[in-house]
Amino acid sequence: MTESPSTKPANGDVCQRVKNGLKPERNGLAKSLYRCHEKKSKHHGQPEEEEEVNATSHHGVPYCRPFVESYEQTPMLPAVFTYMSYGILTIFGYLRDFLRYWKIERCNIAGEKEEQRDFVPLYQDFENFYTRNIYIRIRDNWNRPLCGVPGATMDLLERTSPDYNWTFVQSGRVLQDVINLGSYNYLGFAENKGLCADAAAEITKKYGVGVASTRQELGNLDRHEELEKLVARFLGVESAMSFGMGFATNSMNIPALSGKGCLLLSDELNHASLVLGARLSGSTIRVFKHNNMQSLEKLLREAIVHGQPRTRRPWKKILIVVEGIYSMEGSIVRLPEMIALKKRYKAYLYLDEAHSIGALGPRGRGVVDYFGLDPCDVDVMMGTFTKSFGAAGGYIAGKRELIEYLRSHSHSAVYASSMSPPVVEQIITSMKCIMGEDGTTIGCDRVHQLAKNAVYFRRKLQKMGFIIYGNEDSPVVPMMLYMPAKIAAFSREMLKRNIGVVGVGFPATPIIESRARFCISAAHTKDVLDRALSVISEVGDLVNLKYSRQKIQPSVARFFDDNVFEDIDD
């Protein structure tokens, strides 16, 4: 593995690496990862002791906490078999298309009518090739119908398919108490009983379920204003604004903040809502390598030196767009270095905390709280209420001038219906619970429990021999499956053992990086996690998923570090 400044430790610190190297990025450069610990001998001849080293970036920005991320390189044999699998599936796909063309095999997918053959094509035939020939064969592993809240356990409706997953028929049988490892219910507030549910029910009786108007017309309620003041106080900023849809919070607000003559620097793994918002803005978009500060700084320097294409005029605005937690990789943004770069080059920072708000930091205030940074250093703070708060919608927070500007220029503010009152109340109640303003420590306890569960679950999987991606503190835990057939096999075998998981494959991931994505919740008890881990190990042996050759890294201190779980290192 070649070293670059992003992978070299600063101040002479030595970083641990796996034997077969770290996962190379798609451009051939290695992802910058381990900054943390190494067992060092203080004196020659004395026993080695574990010594904690303060992590420092190549920009000289100190990290106030250990920052440990793991991306083990894809083993050669699984990579070869994965490419072969897709090759064989493609060959058989063309053969089946040939049979469908001559009406030998029936095709159930949407297509052009005979009388419209001379029209401009409505359906792109080649784009549907993957769907009709590969995805459809394993489609039963997604969109499973629930008949209850997605808590630590859930009830699923059993379904069967008489035509190889083209259509489904419900059998009427309910799979009860299925362990839920796939929902974004980080703090366990997605429940139909308790303080939040009672508060939402009361507010429904008073305000109804909707307002049927925009905030600027008849849809502004006192509960909306209270929510926005609470969000601003929760984040430690001057003002905030709420929206009824998380996706639209990004896609409709980025065009209001950036336009022609502006430059957007976007992480290559940003969510589709950020990508759509960037494209709708009309700004020039340049993509930097995931979490790679060297790549970002290079783009910033080029932007400052060369300016806009052809005219060479300075950019009106440079906006860096990143996420707090990347939901497919389980990685956490390098925010201290990101802030240092944006200050150095006078750029703006847009931070999407959809997955990190409530799920990171000792107080649950997101990635800014996780690193112990000043919220004022982030120009635009965005987040959603769908994950940690068990509700819906999103928010934009920052300086008062920013929010006042968005109230009059954002498409979401002007045209979209205001949030439903019971949804608003769910957010207010859960947020006050996290802040401790409900007079209890339930919220704080859940934040700490989530942190414990995430570290415990991830370390146990690594010890079992699975390849696990992402940051050690992330509640999103991707486990590599690689081959497309193993996505279906793993998911089906897990459901047989009463555990629901989410499989992810191409095109949502690179073609040889299919994975199972576990989402850990504070609602998971240690017994539930142990049961799930036991089943995962059993199915992993059955399907042959224990690919890892990485040595287990030494434990590092956390803000809850007294006893993560007593047997975590057994």
Image (cartoon, grey):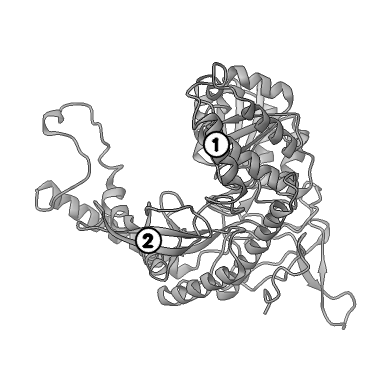
What residue sits right under mark 2 in the picture? 484
What residue sits right under mark 1 in the picture? 422
Disc 1 from disc 2: Cα separation: 41 Å
Residue 470 picture quarter: bottom right
> Image point 77% across, 59% down: which residue?
559
* Residue 433 is at least partly visible in this image: yes
Residue flagged by tag 1: what amino acid is it? Answer: Pro
Helix, strand or loop status at disc 1: helix
Image coords of residue 271 (percent x, y): 53, 41
First in sequence: mark 1 vs mark 2: 1
Residue 471 picture quarter: bottom right
> Image point 90% across, 77% down: which residue?
43
Q: Is residue 87 above or below residue 354?
A: below
* Neighbour tally class for label 2: few under 14, some 14-19, many 20 plus, Cα within 10 Å: many
Image coords of residue 519 (percent x, y): 54, 57
Considering depth in this image, is 37 or 382 the residue closer to the camera? 382
Quarter of the N terminus within the rendering: bottom right
Residue flagged by tag 2: what amino acid is it? Answer: Pro
Considering depth in this image, is 102 or 326 the residue closer to the camera? 326
Q: Is residue 331 above or below residue 402?
A: below
Residue 89 picture quarter: bottom left
